[in-house]
Image: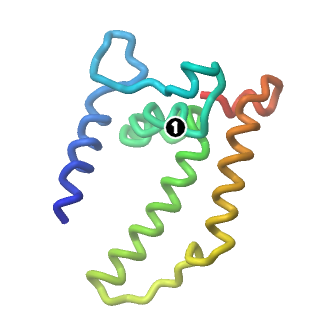
Amino acid sequence: MLALVPIFFLVQYYYLHDPESQTGDGFFPSCIFHSLTGYHCPGCGSQRAVHDLLHGRILQALQHNLLFVILTVVLGIKGYKYIAKTFFNKTVTDWTYNKYFTIAIFLIIIFYWILRNIATPPFCYLAP
């Protein structure tokens, strides 16, 4: 339960401060991979996607980082399963708990990383 305190403050910080703001409002670390190579990593745009999701702007969040939004949904399902089991003693089928799911997520991240750096449509739309 104590681990939720930093998460609460991070959520509040991302809600109040816009990573896309040019006024220097807030501190947001830049992507080291993008700074060194000029290519987008799988996480590029996720800070802006968090801010957009917290403000209910789902389409903008998808434009900033499609994969992050999808993984947020998966984590939401995992959180629902945990809450249902812990607090309500309900059994919920967890389709993410198998060896192939982890391999699939890893491969999706690698392919997303490659595809979002291709400069031709439709792949260029994956870049933040």
Q: Badge 1 is on which residue?
A: 61
Q: Where is residue 87 shown, x and y percent of the image?
A: 26, 81
Residue 2 image-quadrant placement: bottom left
- Most extreme residue toward the front is 36
Would residue 21 appear left or right of 4 to someone viewing this image? right
Residue lying at 64% horizontally and 69% vertically, measured from the top left: 101
Residue lying at 30% horizontally and 23% vertically, measured from the top left: 27
- In this rendering, the answer to whether 77 lies above or below 125 is below
Residue lying at 39% horizontally and 26% vertically, measured from the top left: 29
> Which of 58 and 51 lies nearest the eye of the viewer?
51
> Which of 56 and 103 lies nearest the eye of the viewer?
103
Residue 114 image-quadrant placement: top right
Quarter in which the N terminus is drawn: bottom left
Tally of numbered tags? 1
- In this rendering, the answer to whether 35 lies above or below 92 is above
Q: Where is residue 123 shown, x and y percent of the image?
A: 77, 33
Residue 120 image-quadrant placement: top right
> Which of 5 and 51 lies nearest the eye of the viewer?
5
Q: Name the kind of residue labelled 1 in the image.
A: Ala
Quarter in which the C terminus is drawn: top right
Category of crowding for the residue at label 1, using alpha-carbon neighbours closer than 10 angstroms: few (below 14), some (14–19), many (at least 20)? many
> Which of 25 and 36 lies nearest the eye of the viewer?
36
Residue lying at 37% horizontally and 75% vertically, measured from the top left: 82
- In this rendering, the answer to whether 117 lies above or below 62 is above
Q: Where is residue 54 shown, x and y percent of the image?
A: 37, 41
- In this rendering, the answer to whether 72 lies above or below 42 is below
Q: Where is residue 68 shown, x and y percent of the image?
A: 54, 46
- Most extreme residue toward the top is 23
Would residue 122 appear left or right of 19 to someone viewing this image? right
What secondary structure is marked by label 1? helix
